[in-house]
Image (tube, rainbow, N blue to C red):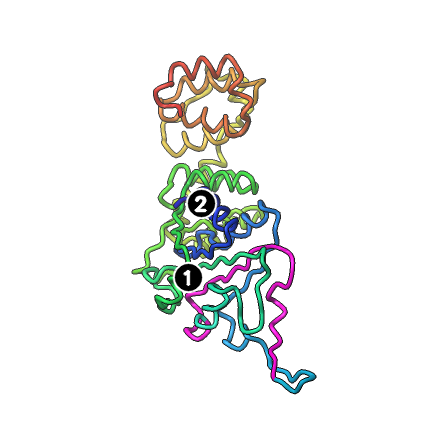
Amino acid sequence: MKPSQLNTAIKTLVNIMQPVFIWGPPGVGKSRIVAQTAQQLGIKLIDIRTVLLDPVDLRGLPHIDENHRVCWSPPDFLPKEGSGILFLDELNAAPPLVQAACYQLILDRKLGEYQLPEDWSIIAAGNREADRSVTHRMSSALANRFVHLNFDVNLEDWLTWAKQNNLSEEVTAFLKFRPALLHAFDPQKNEKAFPAPRSWEFVSRILSSRPDKDLEFELISGTVGEGAAAEFSGFARVFRNLPDPDMLLISPETSKVPEDPATLYAVCEALAGKASKQNMSQVVTYANRLPPEYSVLLVRDAVKADNEVVNTDAFNEWAAVYSDVLI
């Protein structure tokens, strides 16, 4: 299930207070999508890392009341009022006794004397056993308390998120050119660094800090692995040496059209970012000189950059030619 679908599914299940477990490989953004969903719904989020808990941490501590009976004081991290999402992250990485302590909370919305407020829903997440992460097998008793959803990486969804969060154009352009490297995790390899959505966000942050050129490759290699870093660094050199997109817009009829695929991707990304209603005629003029697949790439990205360009004569004329491939 791609992130946009998962977001909609979570909202549906939150509305009916149905506990849900999100499965996915490391680094794909499971925690982030839960936080994003809570923000969109305008409700609170309490993020509990269950792997850090002992069983008694959930039940709380005993005390003797005025009637000389032993009562339990629930932990202060459990909600007492309002509405929100109680997020049990890395639940299947928690020891079995901690998982067992969650049984009653997840199904009955109670934990000893504690009662989960009516408008709070429960979401859990964890890595898959096949990913060779630190996990404990989830018992059938606990698994049966959830609706289980699988998180699948999707480039288009990630690019939309990347644009909203102002990630580096070098990173987004590269991943359009090499989409397989958005997430390239092999559980059979004991790699400390590998390409993943979270890793590419780190790369964008590294680039924004303007590191020394002598250190840049090492920093990126330590984030996404040596192979992906080598490909990205080669692409980044091309991207940084592109002609000024403003100059392409001044003379779209005569500006050079690259032959190298990586350079074509980079040019399309840079030019699309400049697209507007005022210059769409120039963008389309240049797009018409490109190979068809790159022409479509450029205009689609231009529409994403400024949706108003669809109301221009230039776009409509281009769309008439490419109507069979433009969706």
Going by the numbered disc 2, the residue's amino acid type is Pro
In the orientation shown, which residue stands out farthest toward the left? 188
CA distance for labels 2 and 1: 23 Å
- In the rendered image, the quadrant that contains the C terminus is top left
Report the disc number at residue 3: 2
CB atoms at circles 2 and 1 under 8 Å apart?
no
Please name the residue shown 43% across and 57% down the image: 21
On whether residue 83 falls in the magenta region, the answer is yes
Picture coordinates of residue 6 (x, y %)? 44, 46
Picture coordinates of residue 167 (x, y %)? 54, 42
Dot 2: element: helix
> Bounds of the magenta span?
70-98
Quarter of the view holding residue 118: bottom right
On whether residue 164 falls in the magenta region, the answer is no
Q: Residues within 10 Å of mark 1 (few under 14, many from 20)?
A: some
Q: Which residue is mark 1?
A: 145
Residue 52 higher or lower than 169, as above or below: below
Q: Nearer the viewer, residue 161 or 297?
A: 161
